[in-house]
Image: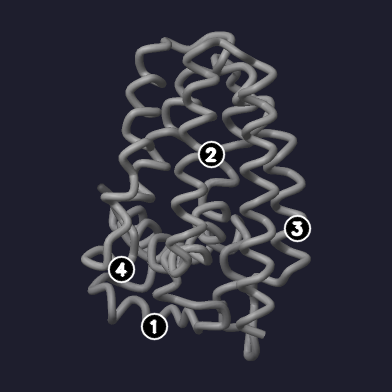
Amino acid sequence: MRASERAYRQLRDEIVAWHLPPGAELSEVDQATRLGVSRTPVREALSRLHGEGLAVVGKGRTLVVSGLSGDDVAHLFELREALETQAARLAARRADPTVFRALAARFAGASALLDDADPDRLAYYGLVGDLDDAIDAALDSPYLLRSLVSLRSHVARVRRLSHDNPERLLRAASEHELIATAIADGDEVLAAQATAVHLRSSLSTVLASLGAAA
């Protein structure tokens, strides 16, 4: 893997996980030293992050991690609902049911993934990522898939705002179980509706988290 790709992935993952919070400086020199690479791959990585909206120009033209306001989140969820409900509908039409029945079973046991031994909820978010990947694979719609992929880092970043709310995560696991079951059953209407309900509940939780932090 190229040094620029490694630098990009590490910085992106740190931003998504809030290890680099909004406003954190992304100095080319400092990040090169920290990551143990030259400035050129870091410059390329920062350019990609800027292009994706995960970094913005701050004071002195140094890039910083972009902010995440309530308006930003609301706009993101407007787009998510449009794209993800259609993705669920197409997955229900085209998917291998056995894949989604297995995912539904895993979400039914998701409470075991939400213990205090995993404060970052990595196992739980890994399961959510597996559902995303399965839906992506079932779509057979390259243009829709490209649009979804461009959202992934932003979506993962917003999801982490719920990681200190285990009650919400348990409800979200049930919502994901219903989505997976609807797709396995080939029920396009329920798959889309369950996805919309999940997104609206998630939006309410995230906006409440942002309000509490303000």
In this view, the residue in front, 136 or 131, is 131
Q: Is residue 86 left or right of residue 45?
A: right
Q: Nearer the viewer, mark 1 or mark 3?
A: 3
Q: In percent of the image, x 56 and y 15: which residue is there?
A: 92
Residue marked by disc 3: 74
The kind of residue tagged 1 is Val
Residue marked by disc 2: 175
Q: Is residue 151 left or right of residue 35?
A: right
Q: Is residue 112 left or right of residue 193?
A: left
User: Residue 138: where, in percent of width, then height?
Assistant: 49, 17
How has the structure been colored for display?
Answer: one colour
Residue marked by disc 1: 29
Question: Total marks drawn?
Answer: 4
Question: First in sequence: mark 4 or mark 3?
Answer: 3
Residue marked by disc 4: 119
Element type at mark 4: loop
Residues tagged 1 and 2 counted as in contact (Cβ below 8 A):
no
Residue 161 position (above or below residue 104): below
Residue 183 position (above or below residue 70): above
Query: What is the CA distance from the residue labelled 1 to the residue labelled 3?
Result: 34 Å
Residues tagged 1 and 4 counted as in contact (Cβ below 8 A):
no
